[in-house]
Amino acid sequence: MSDPNVLVLASLADGDKHGYAMMDDIERFAGVRLGPGTLYGAIARLEQRGWIRPVKSADDRRQPYTLSAEGRRYLEEQLSDLSQIVSTGLKRLRHA
């Protein structure tokens, strides 16, 4: 799984994070290292769609983001679809 949008949303499902923290978290749970351009491009798209939003921070250098209710619903849909694909693939492998 390497869709940056889903990876960013999954990272934020665990709590608010700034970009570098998301990069580290995604690398830990997905084994994928997103480059800055890919990460910040995904953040911009997700923010534009209303799936994430910036939060106030005491540290002006780093901008944390939070998952919106719409973003949570979208992530749930995507993960449900992925779950179906994984389930089907595993069943088929058992019969191969």
Image: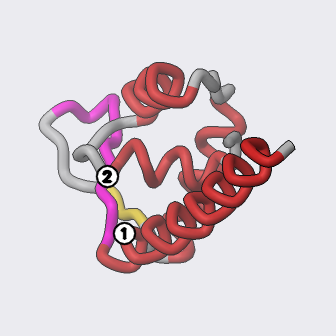
For mark 2, what is the residue? 13
Residue type beneath disc 2: Ala
| Residue 1 painted magenta | no
Q: Is residue 9 above or below residue 63?
A: below
Mark 1 crowdedness (10 Å alpha carbons): few <14, some 14-19, many ≥20: some
Quadrant of the frame with the C terminus: top right
The residue depicted at 40 percent of the width and 63 percent of the height is 52
Q: Do the residues bearing badges 1 and 2 touch, measured as CB atoms within 8 Å?
A: yes
Q: Which x, y percent locates residue 93?
A: 78, 43
**Considering depth in this image, is 87 or 54 the residue closer to the camera?**
87
Highlighted range, magenta? 59-68
The residue depicted at 43 percent of the width and 49 percent of the height is 10
Q: Residue furthest front?
A: 95
Q: Residue furthest left?
A: 58
| Residue 60 painted magenta | yes
Residue type beneath disc 1: Arg
Q: Is residue 17 above or below residue 5?
A: above
Q: Is residue 36 left or right of residue 57?
A: right
- Per the image, label 1 sits on a secondary structure element best described as helix
